[in-house]
Amino acid sequence: MDEDRDPKAEPPETAEGEPGEFLPPLDFASIVFPFYSQALIKLGSMEDPIKGGEDVDVDYAKRLIDILDLLKERTKGNLQPKESDFLESCLIQLKMHYMQKANILKV
């Protein structure tokens, strides 16, 4: 594995010598960010990069938020402060967007 690779370095080469796909460093954010970004898409706060427009599904977004809440609960006491802060920040943002979209919070 290339765990010691400089994240700012060029992407690895394929067997044919072509530049390979860039993979971001593997860290806790790699687990949280896909749920976070998908929830933003389902809340209509971010454009769906595949469909090219809105793909709102508030119930599905709530489920993704619940998954992140479960991750927070199950990792309590086992995260580094930066990881815990990152997860908490993502959850706060998602919950605010959710409350606005579900008309629970008027801004």
Image (cartoon, rainbow, N blue to C red):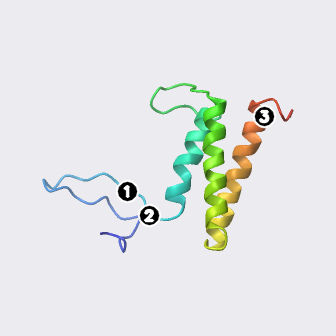
State whether residue 86 appears in this view: no
Secondary structure under tag 1 reads: loop
**Residue named by callout 1:** 23
**Residue named by callout 2:** 26
**At which x and y percent is residue 25?**
43, 63
Instruction: Name which residue type carries label 1.
Output: Leu
- Say whether marks 3 and 1 touch (CB < 8 Å): no
Quadrant showing the C terminus:
top right
**Residue named by callout 3:** 100
State whether residue 63 appears in this view: yes
Secondary structure under tag 3 reads: helix
Quadrant showing the N terminus:
bottom left
Q: Identify the residue shown where x is 52% and y is 48%.
A: 34
Secondary structure under tag 2 reads: loop
Alpha carbons under labels 2 and 1: distance apart: 8 Å
Foreground tag (3 vs 1):
3
Residue 29: image quadrant is: bottom right
In the figure, is residue 58 to the left or right of 102?
left
Q: Identify the residue shown where x is 62% and y is 52%.
A: 68
Instruction: Name which residue type carries label 2.
Output: Leu
**At which x and y percent is residue 71?**
61, 58
Residue pushed farthest left?
16
Marks counted in the figure total 3
Instruction: Name which residue type carries label 3.
Output: Gln
**At which x and y percent is residue 56?**
61, 27
Identify which residue, 83 or 49, lies in the foreground.
83
Characterize the local packing of mark 2: few (<14), some (14-19) or many (20 or more) Cα atoms within 10 angstroms. Answer: few
- Say whether marks 2 and 1 touch (CB < 8 Å): yes
Identify which residue, 75 or 7, lies in the foreground.
75
